[in-house]
Amino acid sequence: MIGFLLSIVAVLVLVGIAVVGVWGLDLRILFGVIVPYAALITFFAGMVYKVLDWSRSPVPFRIPTTCGQEKSLPWIKRNKIDNPASGGAVLLRMALEILTFRSLFRNMKLDYRQGPKIRYSSEKFLWLFAIMFHYAFLVVLIRHARFFLEPVPKLLAALEAVDGFLEFNLAAVGIGLPTVQLSGLVLLGGVSLLLLRRIVIPQVRYISLAADWFPLFLITAIGLTGILMRYVVRVDVVSIKELAMGLATFHPVVPQGVSAWFYVHLFLVCVLFAYFPFSKLMHLGGVFLSPTRNLANNSRSVRHVNPWNYPVKTHDYHEYEDDFREKMIGAGIPVERETAAEEPAAPAAEGKKEE
Amino acid sequence: MKIFTILAKHRPAILRRWVDSIVETYPPETAQFLRSKRDQYHNPVGHTILAETENLFQHLLEGLDRAKVTPFLDRIIRVRAIQDFTPSQALYFVFALKYIIREEIGQEIDSEALEQELVDLEASIDMMALMAFEVYMACREKVYELKAKEVQQNAYLLLRRAEILVEKPGPGRQDNDANRRG
Amino acid sequence: MAVKTPSPQVVSQIDHHPPRQKWMDTKPEFKPGSYLYGAQPGNLEGVGLPNPREWSPADDDWKLPADWQGTVREGIAERLTRFRSFKLFMDICVRCGACADKCHFFIGTGDPKNMPVLRAELLRSVYRGEFKTAGKILGKLAGGRKLTEDVIKEWFYYFFQCTECRRCSVFCPYGIDTAEVTIIARELLNLLGCNIDWIAGPVNNCFHNGNHLGLQPHTFKENAEFLLDDIEEYVGVRIEPTFNRKGAEILFVTPSGDIFAEPGIFTFMGYLMLFDHIGLDYTWSTYASEGGNFGFFTSHEMMKRLNAKMYAEAKRLGVKWILGGECGHMWRVVHQYMDTMNGPADFLEKPASPITGTVFNNAAATKMVHITEFTADLIKNDKLKLDPSQNDHLTVTFHDSCNTSRGMGLLEEPRYVINNVCNNFVDMAPQATRENTFCCGSGSGLNAGEYLEMRLRGGLPRANAVHRVHEDKGVNMLACVCAIDRAVLPPLMDYWVPGVGVCGVTELVANALVMEGQGPREYNLRGEENLSYKPPADEEAPAEAGEEGAE
């Protein structure tokens, strides 16, 4: 459990750094301008580097995992999505994989013990938690664009309206909170459930590394500080937007009156961005490149070239016939030459043994 | 017997502990998986343990019938006989039942003075243990038989290859023909 | 008397709780029955593989070559630049555990290191510890570890306890394929001479003699003649196939197990009868007499070296295209690797069935057709004279081979064929068939005799699904399209589901074939009494037979 504990400690230390840096040392330019730019540069450069690095390694063979009937005889019904035969079908397969986590969804099983019925096994929850987490993260991320855009686009406003529909319900019962954004809560819920699952299921706990715990705690801390600012400590949103716009327009300013909590939140986000390209979080990029998913299963009908294909030592037919000529003739098997080649038999036999 | 009423009352607890005593012979990661409610195709071992302990317990209450009980024992032991267990590890679960029953209903046995009934019940469990030995041995013998079959088959093929593949001076082909058709 | 509770230790003096350790701290134990014998020096020398020596995995000293760490490090580095799959799969696993319980070896052994994620971590941890800055500095904390001899032993134990079945890859959200990791790990082990003999032997044989069993050309032919005698005896027709014949239209290649081992030989007899029945212009080759490819279980290079014979022989004989028999991993190689490795096969023609005229567009580049694709087309076009009632005493289910299911997608063709030659076919549960199929437990070269107990563990999930249909539906025959299946499913059934036989699909076809000029089919191809045989009741019967013959 050392990885687990150290991950918590690491996140607390990060929070501490931001608190000391801003509250104690007043390093607002460092935490408000320099660190965010550095993190973003690391993020983008790292992402590009990583994807290019992967792409540098070729895909020598066409190895899709086929999960359905292949395209063969025209009257045999094929599974176009799970066994794609063309680029278009591959796109569909990838889209379903990336947008709906289709492979994880396979964990849902039909149970035939008491007639066919669907069972929701524990693995089913993995799909549910993963969907909750990733989509909530996406919405939260998009929502934050309002800090960097002036005026706020209508589409974004609409998204916020949908995200905040709970407001009406809460207002009806007289709870006077700012608009409750569902996505933030779902994000925190999702990350907590994923964390809980990792703790509770022994098999998953067994395989977990510090690299698995750390991002979960980091994102939890980001979510918590975000929610804290929105619902509890009430930060000055106008000056935060001023800072954000400054960053976005490359005219950074550090307005007064921005709560230290904001800097803690921002610092953790920066750490996440900088950490991203060098961690397992790069599955975001990797999922697009996976050769078992993004290739068409058509290697028997379309030639695929391996860029590093090299000649190999084989045992050719003539060597074979030299070894067995007498026996082949004796058994009535046709041969190319009735007698051994002109060269003496001994060196020929030796040549076969040597590489 | 009165003890059966008590056992019936404690049935879920006893069964749960009995299942635990079996699955906990696996590493903890695996034990939890075996307890999971995955369907019988994904968790055949856990499924077997769950179903057959219940059957065995039921038959213990109804009176052990060798012919009926053996298949239930077989299904559990057939798995354990080829897994990474020593014989005592593989069969300990039968004896574990005695100790679980004593722990679960010991107080009631004492308070109602049912020692003799407990002794009789344990004699039944001992019987079950003896049956378990036979099942275990049958499984192991099957494994050896299968091994011998494979070795025999390999040896048979090797023999044929020795006759056919290695060129012998003399009437090799005639030998082969005789060998082939007999 | 107060009832005293004896503690479990008193009862058996055994601690039943396995020690609680992190996985990096546990070592595999090489106990008989749970490991495979090491490659004999002669088998490595024969094909020029490194570090041939006498050794056993049970030895303390594995006699690894000098600077073996450097060899492995270079090996990993080289493969990272060659295989995007490998590089990606080393980086992007999030250890979500979706694959954990999908492996038949995990289900059957209960060994946590058989969880696919952990199997891959065995290699990934070294990748991190030796190649990644964080892993080099932080070690175990960053999930990294150094390359030690114990790591090599662990790799040997667990990467030869993976059948490359790809079932985990179906459930992985990123498609991480443990088979791919295992293939690379075995390549690395082979750099140190740490192959298993059951793979190294067939590789050496195949390279020199044309097939895994080392059958020499005359023996191959004699074995075939032996089986032709059997056909004559049981079916009443004499078939005369050809060997190494130039100018044949089609070259037929199947695993050599089919000409040697039971019950594969009955499938072989099935091929002979089927091709005779339709009058196919084809030939066997003794040079390319192996469809299987244990090179695939050694390294990409060895796979290519062995596979090269097929095209070379097709070219030499001047055939138009190649027909392939029933085999699992052979078809993974043919389907996903062959043309890329040894093509282009521009000296062959796009395969077209000479009987039905059907063009196999799906094989347009590789020019090789699967026997059940070919047979399904024959049946669809009504070119076979079939009497499915000859299989009436059988209730058949079908075992999808891992490779043809998850590395090709051949699912409906065999079912179509079986349904047309048998009257009683039932599928197993969907959790255990098609893309979800469970491995036989002995694939990828693990079908060695010394490994029987482990194979019985690995085959448990498959047997369990058969058990269900055996009890519920009375299934008594398990059909398959794989030579390794035919070799290993019989003992598996014998242990877990006695009363279920094993056969190839083409054997079922041949049993149902009405051969021209055949005698009474009182015996099946196995020489057993045909329980579905109905002797002609009156004079009408011969007349009917005559009518059919005239058609």
Image: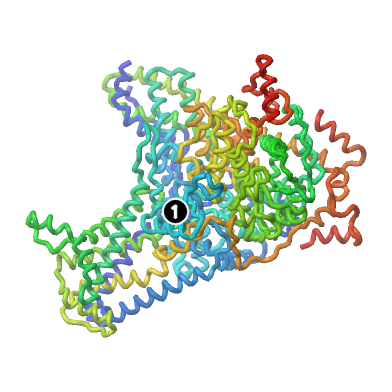
At x 41%, y 70%, the residue is A277
Q: Position of residue B10 (x, y in %)?
A: 30, 27
Q: Quadrant of residue C486?
A: top right
Q: Is residue A330 above or below residue A147?
A: above
Q: Are there few (<14), some (14-19), or many (20+) residues within 10 Å of tag 1?
A: many
Q: Nearer the viewer, residue A263 or C525?
A: C525
Residue at left offset 42%, top offset 51%: C98
Q: Is residue A65 left or right of residue A100?
A: right
- Does dot 1 land on a helix, a strand or a loop? loop
C237 or C539: nearer the viewer: C539
In the displayed structure, C232 sits above or below C15; it is: above
Q: Residue furthest bottom?
A: A251
Task: Check the image and tell me how it is coloured.
Answer: rainbow
Is residue C205 visible to the viewer in this orientation of the structure? no
Left or right: C441, with C254 as reference point: left
In the rendered structure, the residue with mark 1 lies on which chain? C
Say above or below: C358 vs A4. Answer: above
Q: Can residue C345 be seen in this snapshot?
A: yes
Q: Quadrant of residue C494?
A: top right
Q: In this rendered view, identify the residue nearer to me: A183 or C288.
A: C288
Residue A138 picture location, percent across and down: 30, 63
Q: Say what amino acid the circle numbered 1 marks.
A: Cys
Which residue, given by chain and number where applicable, does mark 1 sit on? C172
| Percent of width and height locating residue C529 | 67, 22
